[in-house]
């Protein structure tokens, strides 16, 4: 009987974390599918309110081990990874570079695979206090040296270009788009929709939803039927709601928080336009079924307008098999890809 592949996954937040976002959905959905193929996936995550630390929890094929609150999380990740990879407990370490890089290649005794949605760069200064942002930028500058021989999976061409510009060899990077779930409902004809502008995502400072609120306040002076729907929650929730009230949008703006999939789809399918004003996103494109999508952002997210149903681009997941392993580690990224839709 073949041995089960054992994957140690490094990502700060687990899917149940209050601040979990798209990266955490990606982790959970891919882990679920890997588990379906008999692969053992364990994530080292930080603790959060409502979760004990340390703790172990099973989440539909993903085993989550919480190593404590954020101040001690990263040191414990290093210690745990060193100890357990040297003991031969894991066949591969999969590191998600979407917050602070773990730099696991420098200390893991098992091959490392890096997954990158986007790196912050100087956009970190728009999100956190400058000492923390400066630390993130400095650690990201280590990437070309620490990850020079590590295979990467990038989720968009723009993220791939960003990695190359930072010094990662292009031949080490596989491009695998995030999977897309087909729309569950038929879109309403545009002429029959309310004059609704929608935003879907976490409410964080670097996402710049305040620009959207201010723009809608100006448009409302000329379109009395305009409405704004903001789906999601985050650290900026209270400030954005206060801004909407200050600008006279109290009766026109809805901040829904988290909603069910069905309600989310209904809100988006009934919108005239979906807007993503973020400083930086690594998804390459952000499509909402049955809506137009407007992009006004700096690289690496390319400018695009009029993007329709997300099924216009292939839905891919991780490779059907991990990169080939040689005596010295990975021999290179796999060129095989899966068409499993990953949500």
Image: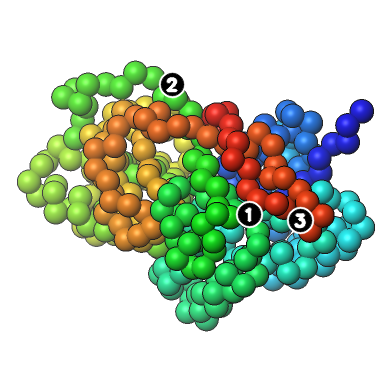
Q: Position of residue 10 (x, y in %)?
A: 70, 55
* Label 2 neighbour load within 10 Å: few <14, some 14-19, many 20+: few
The reply to whether dot 1 and dot 3 touch (C-beta < 8 Å) is no
Separation (CA) of disc 1 from disc 3: 10 Å
Mark toward the viewer: 2 or 3: 3
Of all residues shown, which one is farthest toward the top?
186
The residue nearer to you, when weighing 329 against 51, is: 329
Residue in view at x 82 percent, y 48 percent: 91
Residue in view at x 14 percent, y 54 percent: 218
What secondary structure is marked by label 1? Answer: loop
Number of the label disc, if any, that sits on residue 329: 3
The residue nearer to you, when weighing 51 against 36, is: 36
Of all residues shown, which one is farthest toward the left?
222
Separation (CA) of disc 2 from disc 3: 42 Å
Residue 145 lies in quadrant: bottom right
Name the residue beneath numbered marker 2: 184
Q: Is residue 89 left or right of residue 161?
A: right
Residue 183 lies in quadrant: top left
Residue 320 lies in quadrant: top right
Classify 46 as above or below 56. Answer: below
Which badge, 2 or 3, comes first in the chain's sequence? 2
Classify 303 as above or below 138. Answer: above
Q: Position of residue 132 (x, y in %)?
A: 54, 76
Residue in view at x 55 percent, y 29 percent: 339
Q: Position of residue 251 (x, y in %)?
A: 24, 44
Q: Is residue 182 left or right of residue 97?
A: left
Name the residue beneath numbered marker 1: 151
Q: How is the image coloured?
A: rainbow
Q: Position of residue 281 (x, y in %)?
A: 41, 54
* Label 3 neighbour load within 10 Å: few <14, some 14-19, many 20+: some
């Amino acid at each position: 009987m073949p041995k089960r592949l054992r994957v140690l996954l490094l990502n700060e937040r687990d899917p149940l974390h209050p601040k979990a976002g798209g990266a955490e959905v990606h982790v959970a959905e891919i882990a679920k599918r890997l588990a379906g193929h008999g692969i053992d996936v364990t994530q080292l995550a930080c603790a959060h309110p409502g979760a004990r630390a340390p703790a172990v929890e099973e989440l539909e094929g993903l085993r989550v081990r919480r190593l404590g609150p954020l101040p001690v999380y990263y040191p414990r990740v290093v210690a745990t990874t060193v100890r357990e990879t040297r003991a031969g407990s894991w066949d591969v370490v999969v590191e998600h570079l979407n917050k602070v890089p773990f730099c696991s290649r420098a200390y893991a005794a098992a091959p490392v695979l890096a997954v990158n949605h986007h790196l912050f760069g100087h956009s970190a200064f728009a999100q956190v206090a400058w000492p923390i942002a400066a630390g993130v930028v400095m650690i990201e500058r280590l990437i070309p040296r620490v990850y020079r021989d590590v295979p990467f999976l990038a989720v968009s061409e723009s993220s791939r270009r960003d990695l190359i510009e930072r010094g990662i060899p292009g031949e080490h990077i596989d491009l695998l788009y995030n999977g897309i779930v087909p729309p569950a409902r038929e879109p309403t004809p545009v002429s029959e929709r309310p004059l609704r502008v929608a935003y879907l995502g976490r409410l964080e400072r670097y996402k710049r939803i305040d620009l959207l609120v201010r723009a809608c306040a100006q448009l409302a002076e000329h379109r009395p039927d305009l409405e704004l729907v903001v789906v999601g929650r985050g650290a900026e929730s209270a400030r954005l709601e206060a801004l909407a009230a200050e600008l006279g949008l109290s009766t026109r703006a809805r901040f829904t928080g988290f909603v069910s999939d069905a309600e989310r789809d209904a809100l988006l399918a009934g919108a005239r336009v979906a807007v993503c004003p973020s400083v930086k996103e690594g998804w390459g494109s952000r499509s909402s079924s049955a809506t137009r999508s407007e992009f006004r952002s700096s690289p690496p997210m390319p400018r695009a307008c009029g993007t329709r149903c997300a099924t216009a681009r292939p839905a891919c997941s991780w490779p059907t098999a991990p990169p080939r392993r040689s005596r010295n580690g990975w021999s290179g990224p796999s060129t095989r890809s899966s068409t499993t839709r990953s949500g």
